[in-house]
């Protein structure tokens, strides 16, 4: 690769992308991505899930033969490993600027040195944006796994209601939706699922993740406000509760449930086929996830399986590849550049970031989900008393 374009070579861009993958530097709104283990895996490990019920050990007397148990079975998934990919255009003006920087470097030209720093800063910002875009899609997929439902239909690929095998009795729709303040009982809904998971599956849920809208609907319910009598001092009555103070009410409800209440309103921008963009919540506002904090970053419970990126195989298999060398097969995410147009009309490059990954759920009952209504995210404050 010519010296001018060395800052855009594949090996260098991939090193920057993979350095950005440090979980400590991820944005705080990537809640589930940050608490999900990442595992490099072969294609076969991702498309086939290993199912095993691990029997308890036997007690064997001296000189007696122990029993050998079956080791489990493979359950093949119905979807292939998707590519998670985003591109960013490098325009002709920027390429000319890069060539000018290279031509004037090494001759004591302070202005060109400053321009080189600006170009490097721009490149790193673009890579950070591409890396974030890939992680945001992974975040949406992980949340789909925790909800046991994920669909996607854009640019030729269709994933229709992909599921991970969550037991049906852990997917609950309350009889009364949470936006019915006079008769809904969100706290009982949550505790009922928590108790069922404990008795039937041995799961101890200690965290509830919901949207801010769902929390406000919960606060507005007469049943919630009445039950705060059990955690309020005797002199305080529910009719003087600061219902508009979400943090205060969240803490009261957490005490009553003996579970952490986690509000997650993170969003990402998705471009539509007509060119417009839509702000989409990672967690649908009417979904509530129950989980255990002890399972965070435990690959034996759930993980994000990360495969070798096909681009790193193809590029190194072709002499003089326009993509450049990766130095061998690479696990994602990787970054590289390609021609924006094969006829150079107009001349330009595209910078890419790509990974091949899919979330896996080893313990199918590790999360449960409540679908609590079909309400809007514009929630009125109500005081039923």
Image: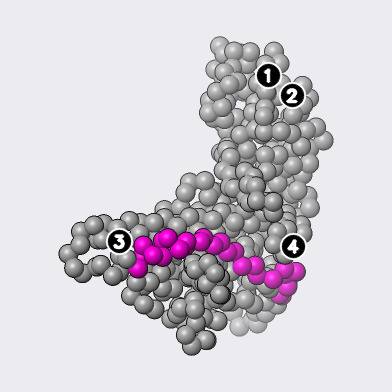
How is the protein colored in the picture?
one colour
Mark 4 = which residue? 158
Q: Residue furthest left?
A: 108
Mark on residue 382? 1
Q: Earlier in the sequence, mark 3 or mark 2?
A: 3
Let me know if residue 383 appears in the view.
Answer: yes
Residue 329 visible in the shown view: no
Secondary structure found at label 2: loop
> Which quadrant does the N terminus fall into?
bottom left
Q: Is residue 267 above or below residue 212?
A: below
Residue depth check, mark 2 versus mark 4: number of the one nearer the observer: 4
Nearer-N-terminus badge (4/1): 4
Answer left or right for 111 relative to 126: left
Residue 181 disc label = 2
Mark closer to the observer (4, 1): 4
Mark 4 neighbour density, 10 Å: few (under 14) some (14–19) many (20 or more): few
Q: Nearer the viewer, residue 204 or 283?
A: 283
Q: Quadrant of the C terminus?
A: top right
Q: CA distance from mark 3 to mark 2?
A: 60 Å
Q: Secondary structure at mark 4?
A: strand
**Residues in magenta?**
73-99
């Amino acid at each position: 690769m010519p010296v001018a374009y060395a800052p855009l070579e594949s090996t260098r861009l991939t090193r920057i992308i993979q350095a950005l993958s440090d979980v400590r530097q991820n944005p705080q709104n990537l809640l589930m991505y940050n608490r999900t283990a990442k595992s490099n895996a072969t294609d076969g490990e991702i498309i086939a899930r290993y199912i095993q019920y691990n029997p308890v050990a036997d007690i064997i007397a001296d000189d007696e033969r122990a029993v050998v148990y079956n080791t489990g079975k493979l359950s093949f998934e119905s979807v292939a490993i998707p590519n998670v990919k985003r591109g960013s255009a490098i325009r002709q003006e920027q390429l000319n600027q890069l060539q000018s920087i290279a031509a004037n470097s090494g001759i004591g030209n302070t202005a060109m040195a400053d321009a080189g720093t600006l170009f490097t800063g721009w490149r790193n910002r673009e890579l950070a944006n591409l890396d974030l875009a890939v992680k945001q899609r992974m975040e949406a997929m992980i949340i789909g796994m925790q909800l046991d439902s994920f669909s996607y239909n854009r640019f030729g690929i269709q994933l229709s209601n992909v599921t991970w095998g969550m037991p049906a009795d852990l997917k609950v729709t309350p009889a009364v939706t949470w936006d019915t303040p006079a008769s809904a009982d969100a706290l009982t809904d949550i505790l009922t699922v928590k108790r069922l998971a404990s008795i039937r599956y041995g799961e101890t849920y200690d965290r509830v993740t919901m949207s801010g809208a769902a929390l406000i609907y919960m606060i507005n319910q007469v049943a919630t406000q009445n039950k705060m009598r059990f955690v309020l001092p005797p002199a305080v009555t529910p009719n003087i509760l600061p219902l508009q103070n979400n943090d205060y009410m969240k803490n009261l409800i957490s005490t009553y449930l003996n579970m952490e209440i986690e509000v997650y309103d993170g969003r990402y921008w998705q471009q539509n086929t007509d060119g417009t963009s839509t702000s989409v919540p990672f967690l649908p506002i009417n979904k509530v996830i129950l989980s255990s904090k002890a399972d965070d970053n435990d690959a034996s419970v759930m993980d994000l399986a990360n495969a070798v990126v096909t681009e790193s195989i193809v590029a190194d298999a072709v002499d003089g590849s326009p993509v450049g060398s990766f130095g061998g097969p690479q696990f994602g995410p990787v970054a590289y550049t390609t021609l924006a147009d094969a006829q150079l009309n107009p001349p330009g490059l595209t910078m890419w970031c790509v990974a091949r990954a899919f979330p896996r759920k080893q313990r199918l009952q590790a999360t449960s989900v409540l679908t609590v209504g079909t309400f809007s995210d514009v929630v009125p404050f109500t005081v039923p008393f």
